Image: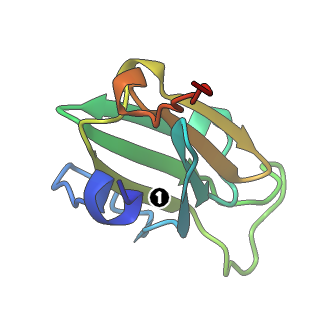
């Protein structure tokens, strides 16, 4: 199964968004391993508290909020960096075990591991002489 074509397609959702933060689709790479798909999304400025991941009706949704940088105790004189809302949604194929999806966030890079169901993984058949 090719994750980019059949297992995972971008899907937009019309949910309410913060109007003071522009919405951006994060750059995303998708890899296929024998036992799982791996999705890596670039979410600069997003920390664990600003990240929301969910799966509903086989749609994986990634929402992240990067707050505007800068010290809270200083007076803002000029701003070119503002808050950014990241949003991406993927339709998952039937060969993904949604109950075992895991996520790790490090330095603004989100790594999702989407395990394949055991019956969908390739099986090696041993051959004996005889």
How is the structure coloured here? rainbow
Q: Which residue is mark 1?
A: 85
Image point 51% across, 65% down: which residue? Answer: 26
The image shows residue 127, relative to residue 29, as above or below, that is above
State the image coordinates of residue 96 (x, y, percent, origin top left): 36, 34
Foreground pick, 70 / 55? 55
Badge 1: residue crowd in 10 Å (few <14, some 14–19, many ≥20): many
Image point 39% across, 57% down: which residue? Answer: 3
Check the image and name the residue furthest to the top. Answer: 99
Q: Left or right: 58 with respect to 46?
A: left
Foreground pick, 120 / 112? 120
The image shows residue 101, relative to residue 77, as above or below, that is above
Q: Left or right: 83 with respect to 109?
A: left
Q: Image quadrant of residue 94?
A: top left
Q: Quadrant of the C terminus?
A: top right
Image point 55% across, 42% down: which residue? Answer: 34
Picture mark count: 1
Q: Secondary structure at mark 1?
A: strand
State the image coordinates of residue 80 (x, y, percent, origin top left): 67, 81
The image shows residue 130, relative to residue 110, as above or below, that is above
Foreground pick, 9 / 23? 9
State the image coordinates of residue 18 (x, y, percent, origin top left): 35, 54
Image point 32% across, 55% down: which residue? Answer: 8
Check the image and name the residue furthest to the front. Answer: 130
Q: Left or right: 97 with respect to 57?
A: right
Q: Left or right: 125 with respect to 108?
A: left
């Amino acid at each position: 199964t090719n994750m980019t074509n059949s297992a995972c397609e971008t899907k937009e959702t019309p949910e309410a968004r913060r109007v003071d933060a522009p919405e951006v689709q994060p750059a995303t790479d998708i890899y296929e391993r024998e036992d799982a798909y791996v999705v890596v999304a670039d979410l600069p400025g997003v920390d664990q508290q600003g990240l929301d991941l969910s799966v509903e009706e086989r749609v994986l949704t990634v929402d992240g909020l990067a707050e505007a940088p800068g010290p809270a105790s200083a007076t803002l004189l000029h701003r070119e960096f503002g808050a950014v809302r990241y949003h991406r949604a993927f339709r998952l194929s039937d060969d993904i075990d949604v109950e075992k999806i895991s996520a790790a966030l490090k330095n603004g890079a989100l790594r999702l591991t989407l395990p394949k169901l055991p019956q969908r993984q390739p099986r090696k058949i041993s051959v004996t002489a005889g």
